[in-house]
Image (cartoon, rainbow, N blue to C red):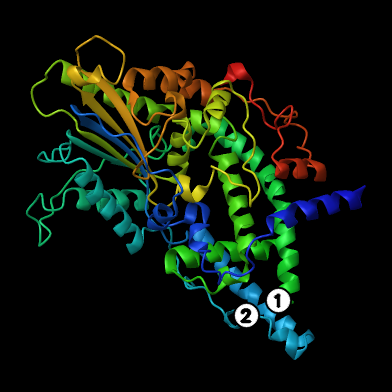
Amino acid sequence: MAFSLRLLLALLLSCSLLLPTSLADETFDVRRHLSTVTRYEIAREASDVDVSSSAIPDGCEPVHLNLVARHGTRSPTKKRIKELDGLAIRLEALVTDAKQILEEDALQKIPTWLWGWQSPWKGRGKGGELISKGEVELYQLGVRIRDRFPTLFGEEYHPDTYHIRATQVPRASASAVAFGMGMFSGKGSLGPGQHRAFSIVSESRASDLHLRFYDTCETYKKYRKNKEPEVEMMKEPVIDQIVSSLISRYQLNFTNQDVKSLWFLCKQEASVLDITNQACSLFNPSEVSLLEWTDDLEVFMLKGYGESVNYRMGLPLLQDVVQSMEKTINSEEEMASGSPEKARLRFAHAETVVPFTCLLGLFLEESEFKQIQREQPLSLPPLPPSIRNWKGSMIAPFAGNNMLALYKCSGNNSKNIVSSGDQRAEYFVRVFHNEIAVPLPGCGQKDFCQFKDFKEKIVNPHLVHDFNSVCTIKMKLPESESEPQKPCSFMCKLSNLLGRKTTKPVNEYQKNEL
């Protein structure tokens, strides 16, 4: 029986390995397969989203914009820098051992860069900061958004007109600064670029429910702590297969941890340093695709559609977005004097952007959108080479963002968009993901959604919950807390890889609790 299971797993993974065998293949760019470590411009170039979108009807103009953006490309964190220092020591030991036991022909298989490799971040005591590539990403994003919505950003700057918010993490606030410099360049009198000063508001990490809800949601933190070991076990068969392949290919005694660290190094080299001929070259395209899948699986399970608490804890952010739209509509209808708020611009993290993306129902088929509203679990992202919608490189690359533009359509034109004899102005929402207008599963796959439909079909179903009910009620664990959680069996891991639904998902929440 054990032999049959191993054979089945080998056959399953072999199907995923039927891809080009060399990164030298001109059609394969490893930089497009780095999950959430992908740079923004690479993600935009690689986007397979249908860029065709409905035309904005005559008589419709944007009156407000909400932006939720991730920080730009950053350096590895201090903890990860320490891991890479350890990897250098480990690689040195591997090649030293190989030199003692391998013949000359076998030694030739070892890539030359491994001999004497040292981490580019060796000796650094700090990390995680926004790098120059990240500054450029946000600066250019600010310029493009300003040019795309000239009527919104043509007014004189005032903090009440353009509200900019960032988390207290330096790379997020630095991203907000870079964005603002692009957005308001040429609008002031500072320096050759005619920059101007602008305000950025941050809340304490401990109380920031809009942008760091994951830090204060106790239910989520408990869920994640219990789920992380299971996710690691789900990834193990893929890592095992790649370890075996690398040992055979290079005659080095790699371990699972070695492969994980080398994959992390590949992502950092490719994204931050534009180096693809070292760590990344150890893996062939099929192996890169499988490693990308393990990252995407983790994002799905711990930040995305894998469990409702992952995104429902972001309800304060969704409510803030909707309230800003309602405030704008009321201001427009009442013909209020003064300059109304034109934009709320937020800068945070993947842990913010991914849940917010899920609250909007993006990257789902319409049937899947109905599933999550019924609290039904979704199937796991399928193994490559199967096509999947859930890819971290598309959903939350560095500087990844969602924009919600509110449009006011005059009565004479809005009647052509909705079947109504009412001549009053109508309001519509258009969602842009990474600057591309995307259809909304909750709005009949339209990318120009009437505001009342947006509230009724997308927002309100979430609002039967609130942050307190989601985050303070104790979740139902699979076993009593006094008993250790049993490890996932081999068949369990295999079922997860196949993307089968289980009759009772691990760590399932009671429906009335969320």
Asked if residue 272 shows in the view, the reply is yes
Q: Where 9 falls versus 486 (above or below)?
A: below
In the picture, which quadrant includes the C terminus? top right
Residue sitting at the far front: 416
Residue sitting at the far bottom: 104
Residue 250, labelled with which disc?
Answer: 1
Dots 2, 1 in contact, CB < 8 A? yes
**Residue 113 found in image quarter:** bottom right
Mark 2: few, some, or many residues within 10 Å (few <14, many ≥20)?
Answer: some
Residue 111, labelled with which disc?
Answer: 2
Residue at image position (55%, 44%) is 299
Residue closest to the eye, 493 or 159 = 493
Identify residue type, mark 2. Pro
- Say what secondary structure mark 2 lies in: loop
Residue 262, x across and y down, in percent: 60, 66
**Residue 200 found in image quarter:** top left
The alpha-carbon separation of the residues under discs 2 and 1 comes to 8 Å
Asked if residue 253 shows in the view, the reply is no
The answer to whether residue 476 is left or right of residue 394 is right
Q: How many marks?
A: 2
Residue 38, x across and y down, in percent: 46, 56
Residue sitting at the far right: 1
Identify residue type, mark 1. Tyr
Of mark 2 and mark 1, the one earlier in the sequence is 2
- Say what secondary structure mark 1 lies in: helix
Residue at image position (20%, 33%) is 342
Residue closest to the eye, 47 or 92 = 47
Residue at image position (48%, 62%) is 31
Residue 311, x across and y down, in percent: 50, 32
**Residue 221 found in image quarter:** top right
